[in-house]
Image: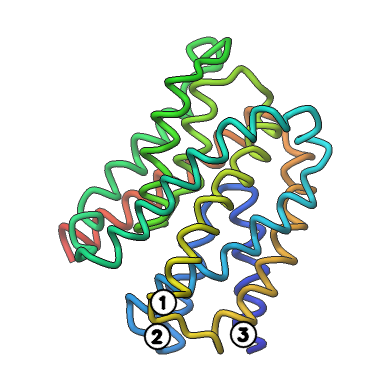
Amino acid sequence: MLGLLGVGVVAGVVSTVVSLASIVSYPALLAFGLPPLTANVTNTVALVFTGIGAAAGSRPELAGEGGRMLRLGPVAAIGGATGAFLLLVTPAETFELIAPWLIAMASLLLARPPSARAHGEHGLTARVGLFAVTIYVGYFGAAGGLMVFAVLAATFAQPAAKLNAMKNVLSGLANAVAALGFALFGPVDWGAAAPLAAGFLLGGWTGPKIARRMPGSGLRYLAAACGLAVAIKLGWDSYVA
């Protein structure tokens, strides 16, 4: 329990800063002996508490964003539900093969110079892109938050810290809906989920304080670099190992 609590704290911070919680927590659950599907759904259930902690810790960045969150929140929730349903009825091998490419593209999108990115709001583009990436969040999850961050960065002209806070909320909604489906129909290991969730809550609350102190370009480039590293690692595991 103490080990999973510590893993949750670290993963919660990593989630809110560079959007890669599952890269820390999912292998840890496997190392503690959980089967892959059980580890995946248990991780998704626990991740709900990262979103709660991150929302509480990101209140300054979320000020004035209530209307936008109300417009985009249902899209993220439906995407997460769709992904969870697909996970429960289909094998994960297909997503394991395309995940490295998706993560690499999202990372490169984040690394684009600010002048090449959006300067205004594109409502339909944001909704379509968010729906697509939250399906991935509900289904596979690895670096899903980074993909949400990339979609928001490409469609809204906002500081990186604000985009990161929005990402935390929207990813949290997608995770929450997927977690509900997994709690009802999936093989969740509640003994592992509870301490991991407690760590996620603490780490999620702490992470925004770190992101707030980073320069906007530094936050984007750090997330992009970490995402590319994850894409290479997952690509190696899927195509070479």
The one of 127 and 107 positioned closer to us in this rendering: 127
Mark 2, mark 3: which one is toward the viewer? Answer: 2
What distance separates the C-alpha of mark 2 from that of mark 3?
Answer: 14 Å
Identify the mark nearer the N-term, 3 or 1: 3
- In the rendered view, does 186 fall on the left or right side of 118? left
Colour logic: rainbow
| Image quadrant where residue 211 sits | top right
| Image quadrant where residue 59 sits | top right
Instruction: Give the class, few, some or many, for how many residues have Cα within 10 Å of label 3's Cα (few <14, many ≥20).
Output: few
Residue 32, compared with residue 228, is above or below; it is: below
Question: Where in the figure is residue 46, as x and y percent of width and height?
Answer: 57, 70
Q: In which quadrant will I find the C terminus?
A: bottom left
> For the residue marked with disc 2, what is the amino acid?
Leu
Question: Where in the figure is residue 77, as x and y percent of width and height?
Answer: 50, 47
Secondary structure, mark 1, is helix
Disc number at residue 3? 3
Residue 71, compared with residue 46, is above or below; it is: above
What distance separates the C-alpha of mark 3 from that of mark 1?
Answer: 15 Å
Residue at 54% in and 60% down: 21
What distance separates the C-alpha of mark 2 from that of mark 1?
Answer: 5 Å
The one of 177 and 193 positioned closer to us in this rendering: 177
Question: Where in the figure is residue 153, as x and y percent of width and height?
Answer: 54, 26
Disc number at residue 34? 2
Secondary structure, mark 3, is helix
Residue at 50% in and 15% down: 122
Mark 3, mark 1: which one is toward the viewer? Answer: 1
> For the residue marked with disc 1, what is the amino acid?
Ala
Identify the mark nearer the N-term, 2 or 1: 2
Q: Which residue is mark 1?
A: 39
Residue at 54% in and 10% down: 115
The one of 82 and 53 positioned closer to us in this rendering: 82
| Image quadrant where residue 95 sits | bottom left
